Amino acid sequence: MGFEQTLGIQHPIIQAPMAGITSPEFVAACTEAGVLGSIGAGYLSASDTRSVIQEVKALTNGPFSVNLFVPDNTPFDQEQLRLAYLALQPVGEQLGMPFWKAPLSEPDFHGQVDVVIEEKPAACSFTFGIPDVESVERLHDAGVLLIGTSTTVDEAMAVQQAGLDMVVIQGAEAGGHRGSFHPGGPLISLDALLEEVRDIIQIPIIVAGGIATNERMSGLLKKGATAVQIGTVLLATEESGASSTYKQAVLDATSDSTVITDVFSGRPARGIRNRFIEQMNESPIAPYPYQNDLTKRIRKEAAVQNNAEFLSLWAGSSVQHTQTGTVESAIAKFLTKD
């Protein structure tokens, strides 16, 4: 059975699970357009994950996926956290919040797995690693198709050996967080990674990273990819959960606007260069997820003030191809041969 038949979709395309962007309306619109919509649930609690899944179900009868972040279990270093927090204070002052606090979040991964098992979306994908054996078995028993994320051949092999059904290989061009198992993983271009992986991996290979045109998709499918994952090209659509400030920044960006930085979350991620990245570039950074918790209030306040200079403007290297209009029209344009 082919990829589209397995998932019940029209096109060999997955909408990237961009955490914080994938509103129920956006996911449902992607599914209705014939691709696999994806809920980016990485930062959600178990109860919020359930709510979003149910909202998507109310909007579409089609298949969709849920993406979860596998916990890093990073050791807590109070002094490292203190130095990172102090380094952020000048930024807070620039936004008019001189004495802000930064509560740390609690991972709810296994609670989210329970929700996925109960709600049974078509698929569940994972970023930052591989879920434990018990979770894999329980999800498979519930009939949920499992998709891993990798940035190297070794990671792709680990995904296959863990018994997951498909693997996303993410090139260095991808917007947002690197899906690597370890923050310091190498940066490998998508073409080089596909060439390394395609003769070794037997499970379906989904490619991700800077894919924004039909020509690029067609080329990758001819080189051995089973499907493509697209995100940045859909960021500025009407249904996208991105703020208007974020959407405008993406539309104004050029091919050389993005950089990879860890200053927002403690993990490398590709986004549009702005003042926050430049100001924090040499400052102490807490590891993920603590840095992400420390900067959360700053990002929230910047969004309220429509200040793109302090937002995490995640975007891929082909950001200049981002589409406007509805999701349906953007995907239709993506599917049109150049």
Image (tube, helix red, strand yellow):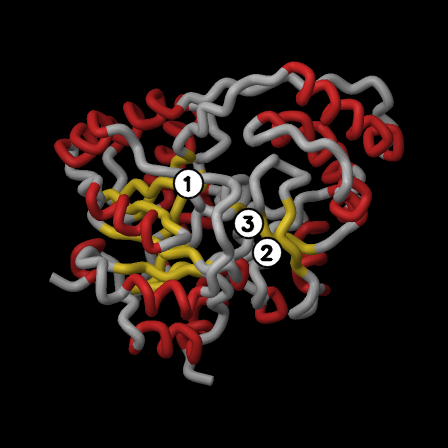
Q: Is residue 207 above or below residue 300?
A: below
Q: Amino acid at mark 1?
A: Phe
Between 121 and 141, the residue placed more toward the observer is 141
Q: Amino acid at mark 3?
A: Gly
Between discs 3 and 1, the one toward the N terminus: 3
Circle number at residue 315: 2
**Picture quarter with the N terminus:** bottom left
The label nearer to you, 2 versus 1, is: 1
The label nearer to you, 3 versus 1, is: 1
Q: Amino acid at mark 2?
A: Ala
Name which quarter of the figure residue 295 lies in. Answer: top right
Residue 266 in the figure: left or right of residue 210: right
From the image, tell me which residue sits under label 1. Answer: 181
Between 154 and 52, the residue placed more toward the observer is 154
Name which quarter of the figure residue 31 lies in. Answer: bottom left
Q: Position of residue 38 (x, y in %)?
A: 39, 47
Name which quarter of the figure residue 223 lies in. Answer: bottom left
Q: Residues within 10 Å of mark 1 (few under 14, many from 20)?
A: some
- Disc 3 secondary structure class: strand
- Disc 2 secondary structure class: loop
Between discs 2 and 3, the one toward the N terminus: 3
Between 53 and 7, the residue placed more toward the observer is 7
Q: Are marks 2 and 3 in contact (CB under 8 Å)?
A: yes
Residue 12 in the figure: left or right of residue 1: right
Q: Position of residue 33 (x, y in %)?
A: 37, 61
Residues at marks 2 and 3, CA–CA distance in whole angstroms: 6 Å
Q: Position of residue 309 (x, y in %)?
A: 79, 47
Residues at marks 3 and 1, CA–CA distance in whole angstroms: 15 Å
From the image, tell me which residue sits under label 3. Answer: 176
Q: Are marks 2 and 1 in contact (CB under 8 Å)?
A: no
Q: Residue at x 21, y 29 (%)?
A: 133
